[in-house]
């Protein structure tokens, strides 16, 4: 009987987070989610920028790994842009009135991040340089239009 009681209590304890009600709204969670995705991208692109500017030594393995991570998470960012999720966010209101354009810019981010990941695998700077510039342009075009600086 004692084992059954311990088992039941263990199951209840483990499942407690599932049954708890969060005070955070879905819109707040969406902001946290997309900011998390963008933080991952920023964390990974930072060293790549430094390598491209020759401020730190180029490390092909690190560069390729970072590029692969960016390509992996880039498609996830758009999911976090749900209606009414602008509070505590750098996103501009005009995202919602220009959603088709915003989505096309996010698709360009996906495309250019994938191209950079592919180029980074080669280690050939003749391929990496233009691919890196392409990613930078994709980021900038969206930031210029849809992000509060």
Image (cartoon, helix red, strand yellow):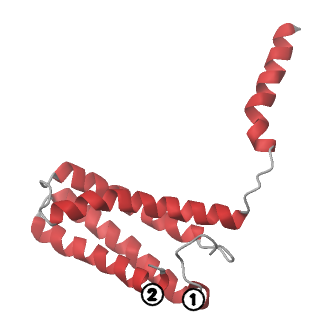
Q: Position of residue 48 (x, y in %)?
A: 24, 60
Q: Looking at the image, which residue is at 79% across and 18% down?
A: 7
- The residue beneath circle 1 is 94
Is 121 on the left-hand or right-hand side of 54? right
Which residue is rendered at x = 53% and y = 71% of the image? 78
**Is 106 left, or right, of 61 in this rendering?**
right
Residue at the spot 16% in from the left edge and 59% down from the top edge: 122
- Quarter occupied by the C terminus: bottom left
Picture quadrant of residue 15 = top right
Foreground: 102 or 110?
Answer: 102
Image point 29% across, 60% down: which residue?
46
Q: Quadrant of residue 107?
A: bottom left
**Residue that lies at the very extreme toward the bottom in this rendered image:** 97
Using the image, determine if residue 88 lies above or below residue 33. Answer: below
Tag of residue 145:
2
Q: Secondary structure at mark 1?
A: helix
Sequence-first tag of 2 and 1: 1
Q: In the image, residue 8 lies at what x, y percent?
A: 83, 22
Q: Is residue 90 above or below residue 63?
A: below
Nearer to the camera, 23 or 15: 23
Cβ atoms at labels 2 and 1 below 8 Å apart? yes
């Amino acid at each position: 009987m004692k084992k059954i009681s311990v088992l039941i209590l263990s199951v209840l304890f483990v499942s407690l987070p599932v049954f708890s009600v969060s005070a955070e709204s879905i819109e707040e969670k969406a902001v946290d989610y997309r900011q998390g995705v963008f933080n991952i991208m920023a964390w990974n692109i930072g060293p790549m920028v430094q390598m491209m500017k020759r401020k730190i030594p180029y490390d092909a393995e690190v560069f390729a790994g970072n590029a692969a991570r960016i390509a992996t998470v880039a498609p996830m960012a758009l999911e976090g842009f749900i209606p009414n999720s602008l509070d505590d966010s750098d996103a501009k209101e005009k995202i919602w009135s220009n959603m088709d354009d915003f989505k096309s810019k996010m698709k360009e981010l996906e495309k250019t991040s994938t191209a950079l990941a592919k180029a980074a695998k080669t280690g050939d700077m003749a391929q990496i340089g233009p691919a890196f510039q392409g990613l930078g342009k994709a980021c900038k075009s969206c930031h210029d239009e849809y992000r509060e600086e």
